[in-house]
Every structure is written in structure tokens, then in C-alpha cells.
Amino acid sequence: MSDTKTFLLPDLGEGLPDATIVEWAVKVGDTIRLDDTLVSMETAKAVVEVPSPVSGKVLKLAGAAGDVIVTGTMLAEFEIDPNMPQRADGQDTGHHHGGGHAAPAAAPAPAKTEEAPAKAEGNERADSGTVVGAMQSSDAVRSEQAVAVGGVKAMPAVRALARKLGVDLGRVRATGADGTVSSDDVKRAAADGSAKIGSAPAAAVAPRAAAVAEAPAPAAAPARSTLSQSGRPMRTQPPGAAVTGQPEQLKGVRRNMARVMADAHSKVVPTTLADDADIHAWLPGNDITGRLVRAIVVACKTVPALNAWFDGDKLTRTLHPHVDIGIAVDTDDGLFVPALRNADVLDPRGVREAINRLRAQVEDRSIPASELSGYTISLSNFGMFAGRYATPVVVPPTVAIVAAGKGRHQMTPVMGGFESHKVIPLSLTFDHRACTGGEAARFLKAMIDDLARAN
């Protein structure tokens, strides 16, 4: 009897309970070699290549692109080929198969670098099963690589971007090394509409014109109704909203965001203070986000209690000598919070360059998982859209988040009368278990004082 192996989905990062299939590199009946790419999976933080744990024939696959697979459940089944390379019994990938019940880390920390394998004390290898974007095979860490599927060579993140933008990778002009399709290639094709999924190639349009003219006109779309098929009233959306009227399963980033927010809501004791920062004295050329970052750094140095992590179970607090600011980035896929590292030693130009880099990496989903955790305090600049004050969510183990609203002009009393001054509304939400109201108020005042400076 042939030997078969059931491969369970490993934990692809920091106790994540599931992942979404992006694209299979094989189909049932194919033969795959050990450590060749099996599938690309999207987690809450990255698109990860999952290598095959064996060499052999593919007997079963867990689902299709877009399906959510729970950690620890069947991902694929193989018929092992004894004549092909196999991993020795003493070698495993170092990944947990926890069935989706792995406990989250007590505090986010930067992931180990990928240049060298993790080391453990003594002769045993450390478990590196929670690093997103890299999987361990034997003693070597394997990073995300471009893989050829259907004759097109592209990174998993680029394939995910193409699927999101409705771009047919097979019709995109590749400009990357060795004929690899890059994210810029996909964005360019999406912008000029040259590679839309389902559209006919330009050369084929003319011959089909006559046939199209002779084809019967399509049936008229059914009239919209406020009743479901069962005859019950249902809520409707504006005609421009892309909805089907059916429940939509949350996936990837948005799915994780829902879990994180629910967890934070259940664990934090939030309190919010709000005030306005008068920026009337600002000279031309001031970068609002850069000034907010600098003001947070100044406030963290003035009141370290808010630049901290708090463990509610052990009732311990960790004050940080450095300032790493989590910058909230809103996307169609959900909320990302990349970390602006060492904000306390960056000059204004360095802050702007770092923020631009983080936003670009978030947009094309190339941001390392280590950059999405480990921050010591957060900033949400929602005022670039709308809104004045807010009660933003503090995500443990951090203690505080600053939110900046939309700037406005207001009449301000001055010596001899009134002047119109521009102000920025500020909201500071903090975990009242970890710091006092007085500390939070002094923190907010330090921010307001720094923002009032001309430069």
C-alpha cells in the first residue's frame, strides 16, 4: 500500500487562527518535489508561500482561491514517492499545527531577521513557527520568492494585487528581473486597462465584431427589490455599492482587524481626553504628520507613562526608552498599522521618507511582518478625510493612541481683540489601568505646546 501524508496548515504567523488561499501552484494529480511551492496563502499581514513538506503525487487540496483554511486543518494530501527526495524524520519545519487555538503573544516584538536561522540554547533549534513571510525548512529560512504559475513569473503579493485590481497577469508586460511581473507592472496595466480579466485581446476584437452583432440582445436585468427571495424585507445599498445582498465572509486583513478590535474592546479600560492645538504660528512648509510625530515624541519624553506596554493579566508595565509609533493606514482590505521605528531620532525628512516607504509597502503588500508589530504608541490621522474628535481603540499591549482630526479655523481671543487661528483637534485615548488622568493630561499638553511652535 502506498504511503500517504496529510499536510495540516501550519501557523503562518503569531498565532493566527486561519489563512486565505491566494493561488495553488499545483493541481490534484500533479507531482511535486520537497520544498517546491505548494500554495500562496494570505494572512492578516502578508502573502506567504507554503512549501511542500514531501515529494510525491497530490491527492487532495483543501479548497479554491479565496477559501479560508483554519490553522491545523487539512491543507493537502500527498502520495509519497519513495524514489524522490524526502525530509529526514529528525527534520521538521518548526511550525506548530495548533488547530487555530494558539495563544497570542503577550507583547508584539520584531520578528527575527531572515539572514540567519534562529538559534536556541544548547543543541536544539529554536521554534520559529510564528514568523510570517518565511517558512523554515530544515535549518534554513526560506523567504518569499517569485514563482512561475501558468507561465507567468510573479511574487505571491503581486498575484494578490492583480486579483484585487482585476488584472490578467498573462497579459501584463513584465519589466522585472528574469521576466518577473512586478507590482508596478500590474498597477500600470490596471491604470491603462490593457489587461483586464475577461476582456478580449485587441487582435481578436475585430473578427468577433460580426458575430457579436448577430448575437441576440442579453435579457434585461431583473428589477431591484427591497424584498428577499423569501419575501422578507431586506436592507438595500446605493446602486454604486459593490454588494451582492449576501453575507460576505471577512478575510485576511479585515478578518484579523475584527478579531483584534474585539479583543482590545474586552481587555482595555479606555478613557479619552480631547483638546485643540493652535498652529497659527506655523511657517510655510510644515508637514502635519511630521509635526504630529515630533509632538508625540516630545510628549513621550515628558510623560513616559504613555509610551509603554501594559500586561493586564500580570499587572506589569514596561516603559520604553525609544519611541516606535504605529501609524494607522486605511486600505480597501482593512486597517494596517506599520511601525515608524525610532521616531525619537529621526529628523523631519527622515520621518517623511519612512512614512512614505511604509505606506508604499502597505499598498503593494510587501511590508515585512516585523514592521506591523512592536510599536510603543499609535497615531491615527483621520482628519485627512473628515471628523473632529474621536475615541480611537487602544490595542494591547500599548497604553495610548493619539488621533488627529480635520483642521479648522476658529476665532481666538488675543490682546486687543480676536483673530482667526487654525487649530488641529486632538484626541488621546489611554488605558486607565496603566496611567492616570493627570499623566494623560500632561502628555496632551506637551503635544499642544510643541505643535504651537512655529517650526
Image: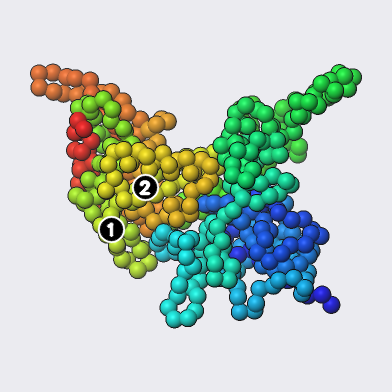
Query: Is residue 272 visible from the viewing direction of this image?
Result: no
Q: On the rendered structure, is 304 left or right of 39?
A: left
User: Quadrant of residue 173 in the image?
Assistant: top right
Label 1: few (<14), some (14–19) or many (≥20) C-alpha neighbours in 10 Å = some
Residue at the image position 84 percent from the left and 20 percent from the top: 209
Quarter of the image with the N terminus is bottom right
Residue found at x 71% / y 54%? 25
Q: Are marks 2 and 1 in contact (CB under 8 Å)?
A: no
Asked if residue 195 is positioned above or below residue 412 in the image, the reply reads below
Residue drawn at point x = 37 percent, y = 39 percent: 353
The structure residue drawn at horizontal position 31% and vertical position 66%, both measured from the top left corner, is 316
What is the secondary structure assignment of the residue under circle 2?
A: strand
User: Which residue position is annotated with label 1?
Assistant: 320
Counting from the top left corner in percent of width and height, residue 226 is at: 68, 30
Q: Label for residue 422?
A: none
Amino acid at the residue labelled 2 = Leu
According to the image, label 2 marks what residue? 340
**Quadrant containing the C terminus in the rendered view:** top left
